[in-house]
Image (tube, rainbow, N blue to C red):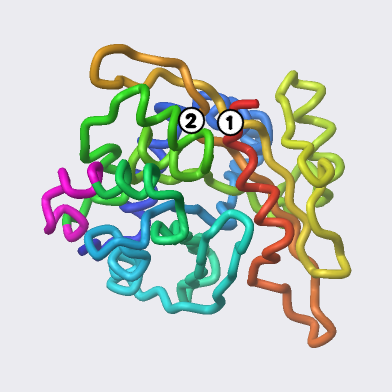
Amino acid sequence: MHSNVDTFFENLWEDYVNITPSAYKIHELLADSENGSDIVNDHVAFRTFNLPKTSLDKLAAHFVAMGYTEQGSYDFEAKKLDARHFEHPDETKPKVFISELRVEQMSQPVQQIIHKLVDQMDSNAVENDNFLYSGQHWSLTKADYETLLEESEYAAWLAAWGFRANHFTVSVNFLNKTKELTDVNQMLKDAGFTLNTAGGEIKGSPDVFLAQSSTMADHAYVKFETESKLIPSCFYEFAQRYKMPDGKYYQGFVAASADKIFESTNSK
């Protein structure tokens, strides 16, 4: 398990920008290099299946070993997901959002494909230090990918990309150039980036103490058993947090907003 939080996130970022080149460009656009200020990462998100080898708890163990504790749980009924978020005692470290698919609630054909994939995994793979940016641990056919995609974009993405950050998140509160999400969105659109408009360009509001937006995912090639295909990879998210009545900034997540953020990897 990882001892060094910073090294872990550096490695995770390298893997992420490798298939999400737009994130690197946006990072450059928003960072204030003249004043030496870098981007503060609000949170990263991971996807997994609720099977013994790949359970949310097994992924979370890596973060618990780095000093993180669970701070909230979320239910995404329509997408058949459970999620939890974790925080580090050092508030400058990114929060972590991990979701898992309720495999038993999927159709039989989809369940069979997911079990077939996870059965190919080494049962101890999840314990490796680099597991959270290790990618795919199985062989996937294009036909199986498309079957998953029909029923669950989430399952198809996870089958294709495996274990890695699904997105990083810019903390708008710590930007030098602006502290307003609406300004960030305008800067992104002016620079030619496409935003996720599901549920509106901005999800959430000061009323729920969190506003979020995100780009639509980049596309990258995934190697299937007999061919490669260009499919949605990862996206970049932007979060503005607001003070609660007690004067502290809200640190949790809003399920209704996160539900729409998941759609940043939709291919349609």
Inspect the magenta stretch and tell me whether residue 185 lies in it: no
Q: Residue at x 38, y 49 (%)?
A: 108
Q: Which residues are magenta?
A: 116-127
Where residue 178 appears, as percent x and y from the top left, is: 81, 45
Please tell me whether mark 1 sits on a helix, a strand or a loop.
loop
Q: On the image, which quarter does residue 159 sit in?
A: top left
Is 119 located above or below residue 268 in the figure?
below
Q: Furthest residue to the front?
A: 108
Q: Residue at x 65, y 31 (%)?
A: 216
Q: Residue at x 84, y 84 (%)?
A: 245
- Front in this rendered view, residue 58 or 19: 58
Is 133 located above or below residue 205 in the figure?
above
Q: Residue at x 57, y 25 (%)?
A: 22
User: Which quadrant does the N terminus fall into?
Assistant: bottom left
- Residue 59 seen by the camera: no
Where residue 163 appears, as percent x and y from the top left, is: 33, 45
Please tell me whether mark 2 sits on a helix, a strand or a loop.
loop
- Front in this rendered view, residue 11 or 105: 105
Q: Which residue is mark 1?
A: 217
Q: Which residue is mark 2?
A: 233
- Front in this rendered view, residue 194 or 187: 194
Where residue 166 appears, as percent x and y from the top left, is: 48, 44
Three-letter amino acid code at disc 2?
Answer: Ser
- Residue 196 seen by the camera: yes
Three-letter amino acid code at disc 1?
Answer: Ala
